[in-house]
Image (tube, rainbow, N blue to C red):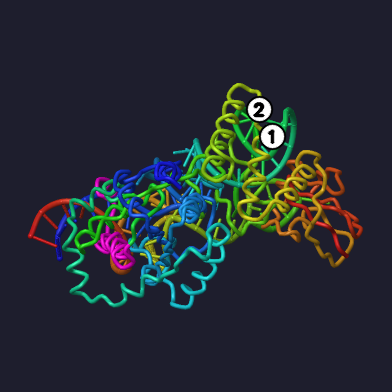
RNA sequence: GGUAGGGUGCCCGAGUGGCCAAAGGGGGCGGACUGUAAAUCCGCUGGCGGAAUGCCUUCGAAGGUUCAAAUCCUUCCUCUACCA
């Protein structure tokens, strides 16, 4: 493929690219480039936010380049540098390994296994002694560290920053030296860390890597970035129908972003689609339904996508009962309604009474509003709580 | 080491003796509506209790003062900033 075309593909959708000129120089050499992605095995649950970056890596692979996936086992074992959040717990060696395996299973739903080299950064970081660390640390200044947005902000807000936190970007940068990456990719929040890699590489006599960041996508709430801690994510391991449903719950305004960053639909078609949405000739619902299918396809396949959509139409548009409903085994056939809800997993009786009073409880499509009514149930009756919880009564 | 300021419900945050199960916001949940689990609007949001001006648990921890404590006192834990 000619150079221009290649650069265009690589540039598409990127947020930062440092720098295009250097990228062209590297591509001119004609050899496969080594594209680095560092991952944190303490949180092995991938979601669509990660998929944005993985899609880009896949594009590199399709252009014939080599992806190097670095599992940050060393950093995971040490834990959260700020020591304040539970989000990055210290992990044992075994836990890290387990997570790393699960990570790879998920990653390879998008990436090409053949063109991916997997490395653990403990391989080189474990070998460093204190002197090595200080020598590495000497190559970067505090002032430059404080350029990083979150450090800067926390420093100004009188929030704590531990010295250890300064070490993390350096460790990550050293990974780039160890594997001799030509390009490193990450989310926009990684820009600073990736740039440190450039400096540290040149200090070690290497050509500095190209840095490329991908936009962060907002989660299903439409506001905050997609993240497990905000519970607004669509996970690789979510069932197809939930992937589809969650996509349907994103705000309309977010649709095009998902389309552009995560679907395989080509750019000109998306432009037309976007225009259609703007002038009203495309129904936003249909547009979102297609997006739902695309996302299921991304994580599963075409067939699952069709199934998930059919299920959605059945349950939410026709307000029908889902095809598969979890069973609820009862000891007796007569129960007070509130107690029945508690048995189904509603956390407290007060909560159950609330749900009933608010009109959220139906049995066989009939609304019941008295929490104390003793209900006589038959096997096969359908208990519905709210819009999304269904149980089939078993006796 | 010294000084100052913090630790409140899922989260943020108000509250400095009773009117506090604790304002407000976010999130979550339920309903209406719809084009969807979008948007919008309304309601709910510690537990127990078929109800109560009822009981229990919750305001960093443990004690204490008081008829009464998230609020006052003591000790402790913990976080932060500034000065060393």
Residue range in magenta is A154-180
Which percent across, then down, holds residue B54?
Answer: 63, 52
Q: Residues within 10 Å of mark 1 (few under 14, many from 20)?
A: few
Residue ID at (61%, 26%): A276
Q: Relative to residue A238, is residue A121 drawn left or right?
A: left
Judging from the image, mark 1 belongs to the subunit labelled: A
Q: SS of the residue at dot 1?
A: helix
* In this view, A8 is above or below B60: above
Image quadrant where residue B2 sits:
bottom left
- What residue is pinned by disc 1? A286
Residue A164 on the magenta span = yes
* In this view, A3 is above or below A64: above
Which percent across, then down, holds residue A304?
Answer: 71, 53
Q: Of A206 and A349, which appears nearest the observer?
A: A206
Q: Relative to residue A129, is residue A110 drawn left or right?
A: right
Residue A229 visible in the snapshot:
no
Circle on res. A365:
none
* In this view, B62 is above or below A216: below
- What residue is pinned by disc 2? A282
Residue A62 visible in the snapshot:
yes
């Amino acid at each position: 493929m000619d150079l221009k075309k290649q650069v265009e593909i690589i540039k598409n959708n990127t947020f930062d690219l440092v720098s295009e000129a250097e990228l062209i120089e590297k591509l001119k050499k004609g050899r496969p480039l080594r594209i680095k992605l560092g991952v944190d095995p303490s949180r092995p649950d991938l979601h669509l936010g990660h998929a944005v970056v993985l899609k880009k890596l896949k594009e590199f692979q399709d252009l014939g380049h080599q992806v190097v996936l670095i599992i940050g086992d060393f950093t995971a074992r040490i834990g959260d540098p700020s020591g304040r959040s539970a989000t990055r717990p210290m992990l044992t060696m075994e836990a890290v390994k387990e997570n790393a395996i699960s990570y790879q299973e998920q990653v390879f739903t998008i990436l090409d296994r053949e063109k991916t080299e997997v490395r653990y950064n403990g391989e080189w970081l474990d070998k460093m002694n204190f002197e090595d660390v200080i020598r590495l640390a000497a190559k970067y200044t505090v002032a430059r560290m404080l350029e990083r947005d979150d450090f800067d902000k926390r420093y100004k807000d009188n929030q704590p920053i531990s010295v250890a936190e300064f070490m993390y970007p350096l460790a990550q940068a050293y990974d780039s030296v160890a594997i001799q990456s030509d390009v490193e990719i990450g989310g926009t929040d990684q820009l600073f860390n990736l740039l440190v890699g450039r400096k540290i590489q040149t200090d070690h006599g290497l050509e500095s890597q190209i840095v490329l960041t991908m936009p962060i996508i907002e989660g299903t709430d439409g506001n905050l970035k997609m993240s497990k801690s905000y519970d607004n994510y669509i996970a690789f391991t979510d069932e197809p129908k939930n992937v589809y449903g969650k996509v349907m719950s994103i705000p309309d305004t977010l649709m095009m972003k998902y389309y552009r960053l995560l679907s395989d639909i080509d750019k000109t078609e998306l432009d037309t689609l976007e225009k259609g949405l703007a002038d009203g000739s495309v129904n936003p619902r249909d547009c979102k339904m297609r997006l739902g299918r695309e996302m299921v396809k991304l994580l599963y396949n075409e067939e699952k996508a069709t199934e998930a959509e059919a299920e959605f139409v059945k349950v939410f548009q026709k307000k029908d009962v889902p095809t598969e409903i979890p069973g609820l085994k009862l000891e007796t056939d007569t129960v007070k309604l509130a107690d029945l809800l508690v048995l189904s997993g509603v956390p407290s009786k007060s909560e159950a009474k609330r749900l009933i009073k608010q009109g959220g409880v139906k049995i066989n499509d009939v609304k019941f509003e008295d929490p104390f009514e003793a209900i006589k149930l038959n096997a096969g009756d359908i208990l519905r709580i709210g819009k999304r919880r269904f149980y089939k009564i078993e006796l």
